[in-house]
Image: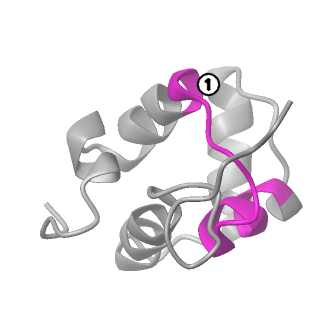
């Protein structure tokens, strides 16, 4: 399967926003991974790091988990120009 890159060679547009929201919540990557696991999404700290740097694709169902954990609408994660909240 061919993975198409977005801008700047990144595999997703939500990673930067996920990082911003995680940092504003004063949460570590490990803490975000733990919260995701508690919700039923099997991710580890390395996967979070790869998402935030744009090295990993983020499937739509994972966006639902991040939206719930970070308490923002999914659209916020998909709009690279949106304000944090």
Q: Is residue 19 left or right of residue 24?
A: right
Q: Is residue 81 left or right of residue 62?
A: left
In percent of width and height, residue 7 lies at 49, 70
Query: In the image, residue 33 lies at what x, y percent?
Result: 72, 50
Q: Which residue is mark 1?
A: 39
x 75%, y 65%: residue: 55
22 relative position to 43: left or right:
left
The magenta span reads: 47-62
Residue 48 on the magenta span: yes
The residue closer to the viewer here, 40 or 78, is 78
Quick check: 45 above or below 74?
Answer: below
Q: Is residue 34 left or right of residue 5?
A: right
Q: Estimate how packed mark 1 is, as few (under 14), some (14 to 19) or many (20 or more) residues with alpha carbons within 10 Å.
A: few
Q: Quadrant of residue 51?
A: bottom right
Is there any visible trace of residue 33 in the rendered image? yes
Quadrant in which the N terminus is drawn: top right
Indicate yes or no whether the magenta region holds residue 31: no
Give the number of marks: 1
Q: Residue shown at 66%/74% (left/top)?
A: 53
Res 58 → quadrant = top right
Expressed as whole percent of the image width and height from the top left, the position of residue 23 reads 45, 78
Q: Disc 1 on helix, strand or loop?
A: helix
**Where is residue 61 shown, x and y percent of the image?**
55, 21
Q: Quadrant of the C terminus?
A: bottom left
Q: Quadrant of residue 27?
A: bottom right
């Amino acid at each position: 399967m061919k993975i198409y890159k977005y801008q700047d060679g990144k595999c997703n547009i939500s990673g930067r926003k996920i990082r911003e929201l995680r940092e504003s919540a004063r949460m570590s990557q490990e803490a975000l991974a733990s919260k995701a696991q508690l919700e039923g999404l099997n991710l580890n700290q390395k996967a979070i790091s790869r998402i935030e740097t744009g090295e990993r694709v983020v499937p739509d169902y994972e966006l639902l988990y991040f939206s719930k954990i970070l308490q923002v609408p999914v659209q916020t994660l998909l709009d690279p120009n949106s304000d944090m909240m």
